[in-house]
Each structure stands twice: as C-alpha cells, then as structure tokens.
Amino acid sequence: VGAYGDCPGDRRCLAAGCPAPAPGPVTGLVVERREDDLLLTWQEAGHAAGYRVRRATHPDPVTWGWPWREGITDEDPDAPGVQWTDPGAATADPPAWFYLVDAEPASP
C-alpha cells in the first residue's frame, strides 16, 4: 500500500482510501395506505448509505426538482425490503402523490 491506498483495479485512490462503490438502483417501489399515512416499500439497493424520496402531484419526475426527503433509512430492518412512512400523506391535499426513490451513495 503506497500513498494511493490499496484500491483493486484503480491505483489513483487517495491515501484516505478507495471511494465507496456507487449504489445500485431502487426497484420494486410499492405504496400502501396505512390509515392517514402512506407506507413506501422498496427493494434494498446495494451499497446504499440511505435513500432520497421525491414527491409530487404530477407524474413527470423531470420537473420535480430537489429531493423532498433525504437520508432515509429503513424503519423496520426486520421486514423485507426498505420501509418508510410518509406521515399524513393519505389525507393530505392534494389527495394523490407520485413518488420517486433513489439511493444515496456512502460518503467518500
């Protein structure tokens, strides 16, 4: 290990270590009503440090802008997939939401 660390396949890493691998895609998003809340569940993305959720009233995510919530972690690690609750969303105005979830990379 020299000044560039020990990074398989890439000797340009800084002495602090190798960059974290990029997270995989989020798949299998399901939204389920739980009284006044909406429960979002998805498959865990490999190498994800957390998740970002975008929420909008229209289905075009290109225009959604910044993430609505960031740093989301699994609310129930014992249940399959990743779960997160959007409190009060089932009874909010407007009555319909579109969601997009993506994985956050680990810090370098």
Image (cartoon, helix red, strand yellow):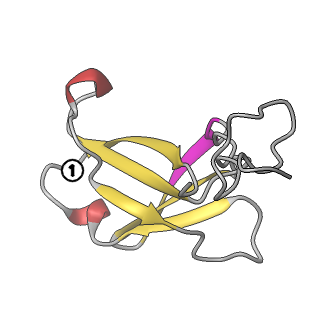
Furthest residue in direction left, as rendered: 93
Say which quadrant the C terminus sits in: bottom right
> Which of 97 and 9 lies nearest the eye of the viewer?
9
Q: Position of residue 2 (x, y in %)?
A: 80, 50
Q: Is residue 90 above or below residue 27?
A: below
* Residue type, label 1: Pro
> Which of 72 and 40 lies nearest the eye of the viewer?
72
The answer to whether residue 1 is left or right of residue 26 is right
Q: Position of residue 48 (x, y in %)?
A: 63, 53
Furthest residue in direction front, as rendered: 3
> Which of 56 and 7 lies nearest the eye of the viewer?
7
Dividing the picture into quadrants, the one containing residue 69 is bottom left
Residue located at (64% from left, 59% from top): 16
Q: Position of residue 90 (x, y in %)?
A: 31, 61
Q: Is residue 3 above or below residue 65?
A: below
Q: Position of residue 89 (x, y in %)?
A: 28, 62
The answer to whether residue 106 is left or right of residue 89 is right
Circle 1 is placed at which residue position?
A: 95
The answer to whether residue 92 is left or right of residue 18 is left
Q: Main secondary structure of the magenta part?
A: strand
Residue located at (71% from left, 58% from top): 81
Residue located at (50% from left, 55% from top): 51
Residue located at (50% from left, 42% from top): 102
Magenta span has 55?
A: no
> Which of 34 and 60 lies nearest the eye of the viewer?
60
Q: What secondary structure is marked by label 1?
A: loop
The residue range painted magenta reads 25-31
Dividing the picture into quadrants, the one containing residue 22 is top right
Q: How many marks?
A: 1
The answer to whether residue 53 is left or right of residue 90 is right
